[in-house]
Amino acid sequence: MPINITMPALSPTMEEGTLAKWLVKPGDTVESGDIIAEIETDKATMEVEAVDEGTVAKILVEEGSEGVKVNAVIAVLAEEGEDASSIEAPAANGANGAAAKTTSTEDIDKVDPPSAASPAPTGTAGTAQSAPEIRADTPLPSAGQGDDRIKASPLARRIAAMKGIDLTALAGKGSGPRGRIVKKDVEAAQPGAAPAPDAPQPSASREVAVVSSGSLIQPAELDERIYDPGTYDLVPLDGMRKTVARRLTESFMQVPHFPLTMDLRLDALLAFRKKLNDGAPEGVKVSVNDMLIKASALSLMDAPETNASYTDEGIAYHHAAHVSVAVAVEGGLITPVIFHAEQKGLKTIAAEMKDLATRARERKLKPQEYMGGTFSLSNLGMFGIKNFGSILNPPEGMIMSVGAGEKRPVVNEAGELEVGTVMSVTLTCDHRVIGGAEGSQFLAAFKRYIETPEAMLL
């Protein structure tokens, strides 16, 4: 009996992925555990192992295919003794979403543009339903991007948009599988190879429409009703940006949250860090961020009621401090986790964080390395940001935003004015789990570790 190989869900947030590469071909024999393909998810590029053994009878999804839905049938194995050539593709494959849905440009033409005499709607979003609805599922071509049906990798589309290259000029000529346009094709192309569209004239009247999705009012598709054609570049969302957008929108709208802000003096921590690094073995360098991770973990242990997550069944109080650290990567961000950070020394945290951040930027993290955190840390101090508030990373109950350390006038214990290095932090709390008093207890413990860093060694 034929065995269907389906698109795996490589993380709980994965809904679709790109089948980047096949490592087998029809006629190949595979055994359980063999690597058969590479899948690009919303977070990383991962290898897929065969679960069953058999002979590859048919490959149903070409390598380079984007938007392949989880559980779509991507290949078929023939069991021992079966004739692989006689096996037919399952009829349900299309229903499983093996290929991403596309809409032709003719569909766009069916949306009638407003006439110059059409009156513009007035009032608030609540009266906007009188405006013509723009269909949210209609893809529009844009400058530097070309038709969405052109086979090109997401990175190639982004580079093309930045360089002003029309992908239609490269359609079918890419060096990727079956003419797919990849990074090196657009890097070698000359900007302006395709004729530029005539500069559009501003429309005399422009209607703005919104599409209602439940209680959420979303902006309509961009077209001449809102912005003049040719005045913007539309870069398609990759899997990571889609996931980040969805999760943060849900978090901001569904989780009742509140901020707590505190100023901390850094002079003692900076001096302590210098002593550590001066006496450390060659190749070991502890950063301020590494010390913030350790201080956060110890503070969670000192205020255990804040090391918690909300669930419909109850509040989960975690036994260990697993600190998620926000790392900016191309196309979004990811939060690799330092597990059991309260038990680890600064040297170990520094080495782990360096490795995780490097592999995060290369999209080589495994799901178990960026999931399972109990608390998040986001540091924008290196960019000169003084203070900011982060959006919660569910199911974690708190996230702390760290600003830059800067010289400020401070009053010392003797009541005298002096110059000190001060850093502002903002703790965003899930109010279903953590109250103001509990959050304040965490910040008090954190302040103690930062201003008396030797306490982290006890």
Image (cartoon, helix red, strand yellow):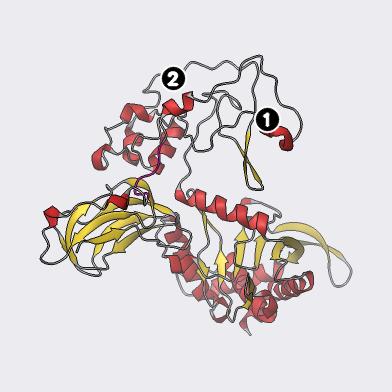
Q: Nearer the viewer, residue 456 or 117?
A: 117
Would you name the residue on which mark 2 appears?
A: 196
Residue type at mark 2 is: Ala
Q: Is residue 285 visible?
A: no
Q: Quadrant of residue 180?
A: top left
Q: Nearer the viewer, mark 1 or mark 2?
A: 1
Of label 1 and label 2, which has the lower sequence position? 1
Left/right of residue 416 with respect to residue 380 in the rendered view: right
Secondary structure of the residue carrying numbered label 1: helix
Q: Nearer the viewer, residue 39 or 253?
A: 253
Q: Is residue 100 magenta?
A: yes
Q: Is residue 406 visible?
A: yes
x, y (%) of residue 146?
41, 30
Vertical position of residue 128 compared to residue 335: above or below: above
Mark 1: give few (<14), some (14-19) or many (20+) Cα within 10 Å: few
Q: Quadrant of the C terminus?
A: bottom right
Q: Nearer the viewer, residue 418 or 334?
A: 334
Residues in magenta?
97-102
Tell which residue pokes out farthest to the front in this image: 91
Q: Nearer the viewer, residue 96 or 391?
A: 96
Instruction: Give the distance between the C-alpha atoms of the residues marked 1 and 2, in whole angstroms.
Output: 35 Å
Q: Quadrant of the N terminus?
A: bottom left
